[in-house]
Image (spheres, rainbow, N blue to C red):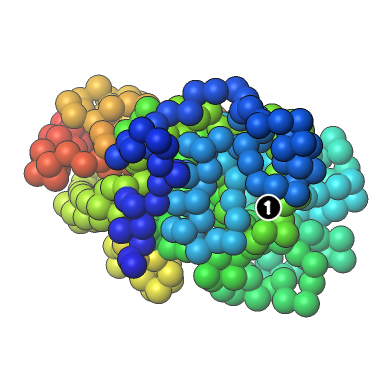
Amino acid sequence: MQKQTKAIRIQAERSQNREHSVPLYLTSSFTFDDAEQGRAIFAEEMAGNIYSRYMNPNVDEFVEKMNMLENAEDGIAFSTGMAAIFASMAGLLKAGDHVVASNALFGSCIQILTKITAKWGIECTFVPGADIHAWKAAIKPNTKFLFCESPSNPGLELIDLPALAALKDGKDIILAVDNCFATPILQTPLDLGADLVIHSATKYIDGQGRVLGGVICGKKVYIDEIRFFARHTGPSLSPFNAWVLSKSLELLDLRMQKHSENAMALAESLEGHKALINVKYPFLKSHPQYELAKRQMKYGGGILTLDIKGGFEKVVAFSKLLKIASISPNLGDSRTIMTHPASTTHAKIAAEEKVSLGITPGLVRVAVGLESIEDLKADFLQALNQIS
């Protein structure tokens, strides 16, 4: 059975009401038939629901689908993507451990690694993500965790995941990959050597900008440790959000195909425009890692970047001229969204770091939606024509 079929047909066990669509299990706790059953379930001698902070049929269904899509042994869901990223580190690392991370990360990830885990005696070295030699040189005897995004936010830098995974051979090192931009439709990092894959389900997994959520999938030995941390600290996903996310997965394959098709067409139509320094998209031949993108990803994804001549002043003018695209810090919506990373999602990053990451004053991230591509091309072109 193909994954698209499984994403639609996997469902929590049907109740005596014979429902076709899974019901919402909006309950904080579950009952036991007697005290002995309660004891056995708490002792993990018997499977069963206890408390929605631990498990819930809606959450379990969502995680089962994500594990299937990512080819994972096990998984656990969270209230947000950042909760998932934090739990992957807090659940697996201890004082004295060392992390090597790509320097091209979402702003909040950098804050966790520099301001939070650092307080606990966990050291982090940031390296240029595309430079495998830099990763290798940064690994020390106490390195326990490698962390990256591929493609990265917002610069669309790719990591050669099999090459990165090879660096941990023979070592007690965990490779965690943020797969938010690609989704399991475009790439499955676990099949490329990763141990954990992390998603902000708020983005493409939902796909319509409705709910927050996060998920980690991967090797059971690591998920068990993360689950212990999560059960006792409480960053659980709500049953309602899990229900929405599970339904969203039924159309993820179709949505990612269309997002990618639209993004490719928009990138091609804007490349070379006189108002732009460049257009960046993984499946454009001008992307510096085009060959890697074609080898590692099924489609190019729904994100492209525009570097607008004239910096922030021109970006403001451009944003005011757009008629269809929304101005928002989010991405992965059915509606096209424009974001200015330097002043929003990556505003806390030091100026010199922004330069090294290619986050220029004129850089605009475009999360291409599912609107008519002809309408999108016309909207972006008319706005760019007026500022050029």
According to the picture, the residue beneath numbered tag 1 turns out to be 223
Q: Amino acid at mark 1?
A: Ile
What residue is at 63 percent from the left and 70 percent from the top?
Answer: 165
* Depth check, front residue: 230 or 366: 230
**Does residue 37 appear left or right of residue 22 in this picture?**
right
**Does residue 362 appear left or right of residue 257 in this picture?**
right
* Depth check, front residue: 367 or 137: 367
10 Å neighbourhood of mark 1: few (<14), some, or many (≥20)? many
What residue is at 53 percent from the left and 28 percent from the top?
Answer: 238
Viewer can see residue 208: yes
- Residue 76 location, x and y as percent? 60, 45
* Quadrant location of the N terminus in the rendered image: bottom left
- Residue 96 location, x and y as percent? 90, 50
* Quadrant location of the C terminus in the rendered image: top left
**Does residue 327 appear left or right of residue 105 in this picture?**
left
What residue is at 48 percent from the left and 28 percent from the top?
Answer: 25
Against 249, is 132 above or below? Answer: below
Against 192, is 198 above or below? Answer: above
Against 127, is 306 above or below? Answer: above
